[in-house]
Image (tube, rainbow, N blue to C red):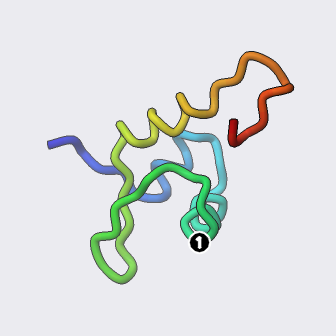
Amino acid sequence: MTDLWDTRKTAQHLGLAEITLRRWRLTGGGPAYIKLGRKSVRYDPACVADFLASRVRDNTSQGVGA
């Protein structure tokens, strides 16, 4: 089994603030996450890599959701 990342490690890997990941969990748009308990959230590194791959763009005419 792959080691799962907590919010801090995931944010560090992405170069984002932890609050950004928290907002994305509420509003959508971020990497898929695993809810283990009421306050326990983890990220699979493979899902984080998929999220990053989905954000690659060739030019500025491609929107974020494109």
Residue sitting at x 45%, y 35%: 50
Determine which quarter of the picture holds residue 35. bottom left
Q: Residue at x 48, y 48 (%)?
A: 10
Give residue 17's position: percent from left, percent from top. Answer: 65, 55
Q: From the image, tell me which residue sits under label 1.
A: 26
Front residue of this view, candidates 10 and 23: 23
Question: Is label 1 in a helix, a strand or a loop?
Answer: helix
Q: Which image quarter holds the C terminus? A: top right
**Rendering coords of residue 8 (x, y %):** 49, 56
Left or right: 13 as drawn, with respect to 62: left
Question: Which residue occupies 28% across, 71% down?
Answer: 36
* Quarter occupied by residue 19: bottom right
Q: Residue 24: x and y, percent?
A: 61, 62
Outermost bottom residue: 38
Residue 46 vertical position relative to residue 17 in the rendered view, above or below = above
Q: Residue furthest right?
A: 61
- Could you classify mark 1 by the number of other residues whose Cα lies within 10 Å: few (under 14), some (14-19), or many (20 or more)? few
Q: Residue 27 location in percent, x, y?
A: 63, 67
Q: Nearer the viewer, residue 23 or 63?
A: 63
